[in-house]
Image: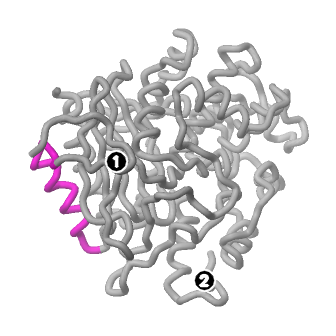
Amino acid sequence: MVTHLPGRRARLPLAVAALLAAASAGALVQPAHAGQTPPPPRDRALQRGLERIVGAVGGPPGAIAVLQREGRAEVYRAGVADLGTGRPPRPTDHMRLASLAKAYSGAVALRLVDQGRLTLDTTIGRRLPGLPAAWHQVTLRQLLNHTSGLPDFSASPEFRAILGEDPHHVFDSRRLLDFVAGEPLAFRPGSRYQYSNSDNIAVALMAEAATGCRYEDLLKRLVYRPLGLRETSLPQGFRLPEPYLHGYAVTPPAPPEDVTELFGASGVWASGAVVATPEDLGRFIRGYAGGSLFSPHTRKEQLKFLPGGASEPAGPGVNSAGLAIFRYATRCGVLYGHTGNTAGYTQLAAATPDGKKSLTFSITTQTSKTVKPALLAQVRKVQEDFACALLRR
């Protein structure tokens, strides 16, 4: 584990450790665009829940949640997007999606399944014979539902040491699995669930091998364009497009520290590097969770859920794992979606099974089962309140 970053204040190693441990009364209105100010929230109880999260000890400086129904958005926000300027969060602010990026690599893979370029039974050995022979029988299905047994590259001591010495280090994203190439599988493929950042790196590499196209280009052709995503990207560096929602390491009694651009994105790539706005994220999850990208057969396979398979961090209600998607069974009904967390951000995007309604929920500090678990419990409760509001109307 990293204990020191040369030339940085003593608090920054906490942000590094957190990232590695995660391994991350107005009416309904039209979606807000740049320059527009969302009206006051309609549901004061939801607003108070968001404000309690921001006001919690160790809570985020800012939070924004967007409920979308039939082309109309209801925006809730608390705190600020930037402690330096004090401006509020907006639906047009860019932000790091962290492990929500796994849903995007899942979308690419499942679209290639529909095209006949891959099958869910395609093995690593068939498409990526250069990877360790012990991994060759792992299938695309097992990668997508995290039953592969692949060791997690982000837990590698060598990977952590490099990132700790230079958080902006530029990794060769297509060689990230080299960090664990000498390790055996953690368990027999398909025998149990274990979330691993390596899975979606392998998914992206299989997509490239099947098509001869770069993963970044496949994202544009198979996901961004069909869904009309104009503010979504997969950066390699540490910069974010402006405007952006600033992410913070919050470790009281010290003041919050801006870690938005602390880490480069090349070390997470298809597993966690996607950047989008709440508007674009909502558009994506309605298409992805609603099944509009896939054939009925592929959709059916995507929604074969494993009980006990929770996203990281866990989403609202009882979690089950499908193919790069999770089922959140709340007290008010079911949503499909994904979560993510990294230094400065915790994310949830979910939609109704028909894709007509969606919820995006973003806070500007990291929380997970190992990083601020009490805050995560509070966040999940408020997320479920928002899910109920979405499902009841």
- Crowding at dot 2, Cα within 10 Å, few <14 / some 14-19 / many 20+, comes out as few
In the rendered structure, which amino acid carries the disc numbered 1? Phe
Q: Toward which corner of the image does residue 33 lie, by quadrant?
A: top left
> Which residue is labeled 1 in the image?
361
Secondary structure category for the residue under label 1: strand
Magenta span contains residue 206: no
| Residue 217 in sight | yes
Report the quarter where the C terminus lies.
top left
Q: Nearer the viewer, residue 279 or 210?
A: 279
In magenta stretch: residue 48: yes
Percent coordinates x, y for residue 348 in the rendering: 39, 45
Q: Which residues are magenta?
A: 40-57
- Pointer 2: what residue? 3
Whether residue 370 appears in this view of the structure is: no
Q: Which residue occupies 69% across, 70% down?
A: 168
- What x and y, as percent, mark residue 176? 76, 54
Q: Residue at x 63, y 78 (%)?
A: 2
Q: Residue furthest top?
A: 296
